[in-house]
Amino acid sequence: MGFEIFRKMDWSALVHEYDLDGKRLLPWDRYPMPFAAGWCVVRPHTHSEPHVQIDQEIFIALKGTARLVIGDAQYLFETGDIAAIPKHTNHYVINDSDEDFHFYVIWWDKFIAGDYMKADITHLESENV
């Protein structure tokens, strides 16, 4: 097998950015994708950095309860909930609880998709998994 098809989560590799702890998980080397993704943890009684981005995002709540602010609206964001974050829209996550709040983020834009369209994926088509 020429490329990785399974990876364990390395919790020690979380990086503090956007005022949360996270890890960029996708895309993998040698496995092009038209999107990127990461695992995010908002620690108790903190919030992520309010910001806007040029890409579009999907947030999926994985563990815990938080408040999600998108533009001028605020939503209760709980395990299993999903939210679409339009590009150029201010957004952030507030964790008022005593537990970590975990969510998964998927993002894409024309540049990420364009890189995928130009990528050589012949090694994926020819190898047995």
Image (tube, rainbow, N blue to C red):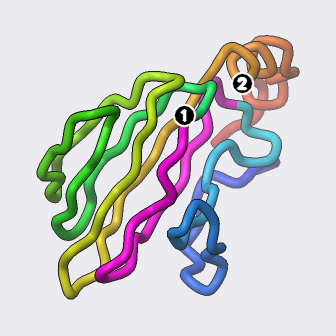
Amino acid bearing label 2 = Ile
Residue 54 location (% of width, % of height): 63, 25
Question: Residue 118 is drawn in which quadrant?
Answer: top right
- Range covered by the magenta-colored residues: 33-52
Instruction: Characterize the local packing of mark 2: few (<14), some (14-19) or many (20 or more) Cα atoms within 10 angstroms.
Output: some
| Quarter in which the C terminus is drawn | top right
Residue 26 location (% of width, % of height): 63, 47
Amino acid bearing label 1 = Trp
Along the line of sight, the residue nearer the viewer: 122 or 62: 62
Q: Which residue is mark 1?
A: 107
Residue 22 location (% of width, % of height): 55, 67
| Label 1 SS | strand
Q: Are marks 2 and 1 in contact (CB under 8 Å)?
A: yes
Q: Which residue is mark 2?
A: 112
The vertical placement of 106 against 67, above or below, is above
Compared across the picture, whether 114 is left or right of 96 comes to right
Instruction: Characterize the local packing of mark 1: few (<14), some (14-19) or many (20 or more) Cα atoms within 10 angstroms.
Output: many
Residue 45 magenta-highlighted: yes
Along the line of sight, the residue nearer the viewer: 87 or 13: 87
The residue that appears at 27% across and 34% down in the rendered structure is 72
Along the line of sight, the residue nearer the viewer: 67 or 34: 67
The residue that appears at 60% across and 64% down in the rendered structure is 23
| Label 2 SS | helix
The residue that appears at 62% across and 86% down in the rendered structure is 12
The vertical placement of 64 against 126, above or below, is below
Compared across the picture, whether 41 is left or right of 13 comes to left
